Structure formats: C-alpha cells, structure tokens
Image (cartoon, coloured by chain):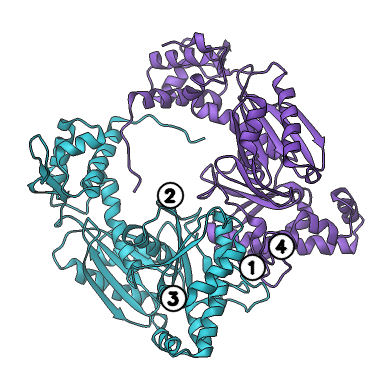
Chain colours: A purple, B cyan
Amino acid sequence: MSRPQRASRHTVRRLNSALVLDAIAGSPGVSRAAIAAQTGLTKVTVSVLVEQLIAADLVAEGDVEARSGPGRRGTALHLSPSGPHGLGVEIGVDRVGTCLVDLAGRVCARWTRSEDNRRLSPETVLSRVADAVRAALARGIEVGGVGVAVPGLVSTDGTVRTAPNLGWREVDVRDGLSSRIGVPVRVGNEANMSALAELWHGYGASDFVHVSGEFGIGAGLVVDGELFRGVGGFGGELGHLSVDPRGPGCPCGSRGCLEQAAGPVELVRRSGARDLADLLSRLSARDRVATAAVHAAARWLGVALADAVNLLNIPTVVLGGIYARLFPRLRDPLMAELGRRVVSARWTPVRVVASTVGADAAMRGAATEAVRTILEDPDTYLTSTLRPRESSARTP
Amino acid sequence: MSRPQRASRHTVRRLNSALVLDAIAGSPGVSRAAIAAQTGLTKVTVSVLVEQLIAADLVAEGDVEARSGPGRRGTALHLSPSGPHGLGVEIGVDRVGTCLVDLAGRVCARWTRSEDNRRLSPETVLSRVADAVRAALARGIEVGGVGVAVPGLVSTDGTVRTAPNLGWREVDVRDGLSSRIGVPVRVGNEANMSALAELWHGYGASDFVHVSGEFGIGAGLVVDGELFRGVGGFGGELGHLSVDPRGPGCPCGSRGCLEQAAGPVELVRRSGARDLADLLSRLSARDRVATAAVHAAARWLGVALADAVNLLNIPTVVLGGIYARLFPRLRDPLMAELGRRVVSARWTPVRVVASTVGADAAMRGAATEAVRTILEDPDTYLTSTLRPRESSARTP
C-alpha cells in the first residue's frame, strides 16, 4: 500500500505552480480564467502563480484569447519561447550531436559531427563534447538543463558503468562534463532517451516498448506515460535477451544475445552490405542474401519482443533506429513470430509501428527531458542557481 | 508528465481515513496523539476519523498505551480482529482451497480439497467453489471481500481468458461465482496473487520477481511495492518466455517455452519421479537422473530469469511453488546462469531466495488483497452494500 502523505503548504504551492504550467503547456493560448476553471484553483491564486511564471520567463502573454461565447476575453498564455531551453547531447558510437529545444520541446538548433568515438579515449570524447556544449551555450539562449544520452548502462549518479559498443567502462560522464562546462548535467541511456522522445514527439501512447538500434540494440519501456528504469536504472537491455542459448558468444559475457543475432552491425554484415544505405539499396534490388538476412533478423527480434510482451503485457512496440528504416521489410516476419509466441495476443493484440522521430531521437529526448524537469517542478527551477537573471523578479 | 490534480474535500476525507488506518495497521497499539504527530493531522480530526473507523469495526481500542516518558497515556488502537475478513479462493489444477484472513492479514481458517479440476467442467468446478465459499461465509464472520486465484490469463473484468493447465477458455469466473454466492468477487491470476502474498507475508522487498510453479510456471512482478499487471492484466507470463526457439512445441502455440523445458510437470517427468515428494526423495538418495533433470531445469530457469532481469533491472528473484522446495538443489546452477547472462549483475547483483509463504500463497494473497482494498479506501467500504450492519453507526 502506498502511504498517503499530508501535503505541506510549500508542497501545495509547488504542486499548484506545476498544475498551472501544465494547463498552459497542454492548451497553448489558454486564459487565466480557463485555467482556474480547469484546475479548480481560485482566479486569484492562478493570477499570482501566472505572474511568478511570467517573471521567470516560463510563461509569456500573447494576444487576447480568441473564442466565441459570452464573457470577457482573457489574455492568451503560452510557454515562453525565450524561456529556458533544454540542451540534449548524444554521445554515439560514430558521432557526437547536440540539440536545443524550447520549453514546448520544439527543436531550435541542432549540430552533429561524425567521429569514431571508439578510437578516442573517454577523456578526449568528453572534452570534445564539452566544446560542443560550450558552443551551444554561447548562443545567448538561456539553458535550463543539459541531458546526455550514452549507449550503455548508466547509473543514477551519472556514471557510465559499461558501454560495450564504445569500449567504455566506469566513466563518470556527469562530473567529467559538468566540471568542464560549469552547468549541471543529467546522463541517461540512449535507448531510454529515445523512448522519451517517442513518448513526447512521436507515437505518444502511454504504454509501449521502444526499440532503438544504431550499433547495438536497446529498449526503453514506457509504462503509464513514464519511463520504466528498474532498480538501478539499467532496465531495457533487450539486446541481451537470450534468443538462442546455443548461439554465438556476446562481448557482454553471455551467449545467444539478440544483439548478436539481429543487431545493426550483424545485420549489415550478414546482408553482405557495407552500411545501412547499401543494405537498403540491396533490398530494393531484391538481393536474396540481404532479404534473407533481414527476414532472419525480424524473426529473432520477434522472439525477443515476444518475451518482453509475455512478461510485461505491453503489446505496443515502436521500432526506432535502423529498424524504423527497415520496417516495411521486417513487418511481416516479425508480426508472424509475435502472433505465434505472445500468449495474450488474442485479447490484447500486438501492434508494431515504426518510429517517426528519426535519428536525433536520443538527443531530442535528453533535451526535452531537461525542459520537462523544469515544467514538472517550476518552483525548484525558480530557486535554482542556473538562472541568475530572474532572481530579483520573484514575488515573495 | 503526470497531471497533478487538486484534491476535493471528499477526496481529502477519504485520503485522511486511509492515512489514519494505515498508521494503525503499521503500528498496532498506536495512540490517537501519536497518529496526529505522525500524519500531521490535528488531534480533533484524528479523533473524529478514529470514531468512524471504530463504529465500522475496522479499528478496536485496547489497553492504555504502554510507553515511558512524560505526557498522558493514550488508548492503544489496532485493527479490529472482529472486523471484515478477506476470503481467498484458489482454483488449482488439482485442488480447491479457501482461506479467511482478518484485517491484519492473519489466517483465521483454511480449507482445501483435492480434486482433479481438469476432469470437471468449469460449471461443476464453480459450483463446488461456491459451496466452499458458502461454507466459509456461514461461519458468522463478516467477510468484506472475496478474491479468487486462477492459473490462467484473467481479464480485468474477471473472465478467465485461457487457463491451459485447467483446459479452460473464456470462463466468466467473477459473474459465475458472484451470482452463486451473492457477494462481489475479484478474480486474479494465481502467480500474481502469490506474488502479493510474498509482498505482504513473505520476503517483502519493494521490487522482486516472484516465480510460482505448481503445474505451469508463472511470475508476479512487484514494482515499487505494487503488482505490475500490464495493459490487460496479462503480465508475468514467464512460463512462456522462449528459452530455446528450436525447442518442443507448447500448448500455447509457441515453441521452446520455459514451461516445456523446466515446468513442474516436465521436471518431475524427466526426473523419472512420480511426483514432487518422490523427486525430493530421489534427490536425497543422490539419484543421477533426478539430479541432472533439476540442474537442467535450473539452467533454463536462469536463461528466462536473466531475460526478465535484463529487461526490468529488478535483480531480486523469489522462488515459490515447487522451486522453493527444490531451492537448495537449484541454487548453484541457477546463480551461475544468471551471473553469466545478466549484464548489470556487477552493479545491481542478482539475489535469489526461496519463498517462505508455502503452498497457500495464491489463496492467501487473494484473501489479503480483499482486506487491503478495504484498508486503502475505508470510505468506500463504509458506504458499500457488503456491510449492512454498521450503516446506522456512521457519523455524517
């Protein structure tokens, strides 16, 4: 039984700030009166909270509300486009990328650089990432939070425990980066960040399994509209589900992992292709080897995803990464395998869709998570050191 | 982002009733003053709520509080032993059982009857279950809720969609039973009910995977102190994780399911034993076939549980059912397999323990869930039709 707790006055104000901001984020252009009606707060309370949010540049006033019907028109409120932005960083195997999103999650700027990060020391990579972040911070846009996505097991303290495809072990990305850029940093697993991007900018169902795959295979589990991280933050290791216990060894130490059977690197190799573009053109040319390799990968994906659906009864799968690009070729054999193996398929049918978020999913998720953190708890942001500019404007 | 909601006055009273009851359940013998201090509610509010709970026979007064230190001694409060009980029912493959638990979850009575339910029609089984429930209801103990555990996929509406080991498909257990006994019934999967029993009466960690196995294999996933049910309530189908895609066919329609490789029925058969007791005595006699069969089953369990831990990062496994009895023989090969296959094992070490709840876990979980429902929302119970006796005692 979850223990209910009595709310303190401070908690109530915090919740009410978040409530008002949530109403504005959910209905851009909404008026103070409409927020009061929607939230059940008094108009006076709403007005006081809105003034604080405007002073902090989290909310901006627009035109007088456009609506028909009786009553005075209110001023339209929306999230401030000049308010704090989220800076997302992706440390990929073959690139570093950054993107800036505004409070509404719109991408304002993005930057990527191809780089084989496996050949560089973590120190060098973090130093280059810091350069990229400083360049983004120097644009004069207020940044309210920095999120970093890394393809590996990331502890809740921001340490990358292991990132096999990068060759990293025990790299303290959070401190290594925040000490270089002087701004607090949150670090997460790229599959989790991609799933959050899918939740906020893509498919948007409340419960789904998002599969990402650029080099390895990862998954982000979204449950009831939130990321499911597990006890230590290491959940979603779909790539290391065992699909064939007699299969080949995996660098993780196990045997027969999905990543060895259907991972992007293996799939391209078994197709006889050089890279994804080459694989796609071979598929278009009806190349037999490439087609067979993709069908086999689809079946292995189906075995592992059936395990996930049988365990979780989350019957919606969103394919990202290269699997989104290959979706038309993967769909039929994947669905056939899921149909055979998911015991509840008859009552909660399995649905598989391709992600529409694209290759920037991880950094976009990391950037949006940074602004969502502000939106969910504006009071903490109002008192944080990240925003010296508005500190004098707060009402007591 | 979870939308915060402003609490109405009715909701506040409901929450406060639950808060007071939770304080009493968590600290039997607590005084009104101590509840006020613990919850932050005023003493007057606590007193009013306690009187309502006493009038409803949810709470009883005991002796004057025993404690040292200054101040007036308060009267000790505890959950009423004569208050509403929970009636749990297990419809197993080879037995029907019922048990009664009081508000504190203590078992007051239990009854089981061996019966090969596979040979009977669902109608006949439900009719016999109804007889057993009526016998329990006739004891003169107030019953606040009835919970039924069935080894199959159970919809949230109480329909058993499929229970392969019983041979049932589309059996409306909830209505079939409540129409016979005249009392509302909740129906759940036996693996889920067993996991709840483990949560409340056994291992008690906030996050664990509980494995049950009497005929088939099921799992209950406990996340953050609550059962994880999945979108349709069909989660936890560990027995149908594919451990060997080239393995034998399974009645579920899939191939290579864990249940076929390591399920109780298969394990006893491969051991050359007649039943679990025979298997245990063969193991004691160091029988080679039996020992090899148990070791093989342990490795297959390890493959499937590693999948679960890799996906969920819930590194605590509680073995119930026959696996609890076999635990000393299973432990080493199972731990070896998990150590090899769980990628996060180094940072969140996997722990496997044997359940101590015993063979009544499913019906005990179902019974306790019925009383927990009352404890978590006493206000709804106070106004429910199940308890006509106290309706005149309520304060407005």
Mark seen at residue A138: none
Could you tell me which quadrant the C terminus of chain B lies in? top left
Asked if the residue under mark 3 is in contact with the one under mark 1, i.e. CB atoms within 8 Å, the reply is: no
Residue B137 lies, with reference to residue A6, above or below; the image says: below
Q: Which mark is nearer the camera, 2 or 1?
A: 2
Mark seen at residue B328: 3
- Pinpoint the chain carrying mark 4: A
Name the residue beneath numbered marker 4. A250
Per the image, label 2 sits on a secondary structure element best described as loop
Q: Which one is in front, B77 or B73?
A: B73
Q: Which mark is nearer the camera, 4 or 2?
A: 4
Asked if the residue under mark 2 is in contact with the one under mark 4, i.e. CB atoms within 8 Å, the reply is: no
Both labels 4 and 2 in a single chain: no
Q: Is residue B242 left or right of A251 when viewed as pictured?
A: left
Label located before the other in sequence (4 or 1):
4
Q: How far apart are marks 2 and 1 (CA)?
A: 32 Å
Q: Which mark is nearer the camera, 4 or 1?
A: 4
Asked if the residue under mark 3 is in contact with the one under mark 2, i.e. CB atoms within 8 Å, the reply is: no
* Residue density around tag 3, few if under 14, some if 14–19, many if 20 or more, within 10 Å: few
Q: Which one is in front, A30 or B122?
A: A30
Residue A123 lies, with reference to residue B353, above or below; the image says: above
The count of marks equals: 4
Per the image, label 4 sits on a secondary structure element best described as loop
- Pinpoint the chain carrying mark 2: B
Q: Which mark is nearer the camera, 1 or 3?
A: 3
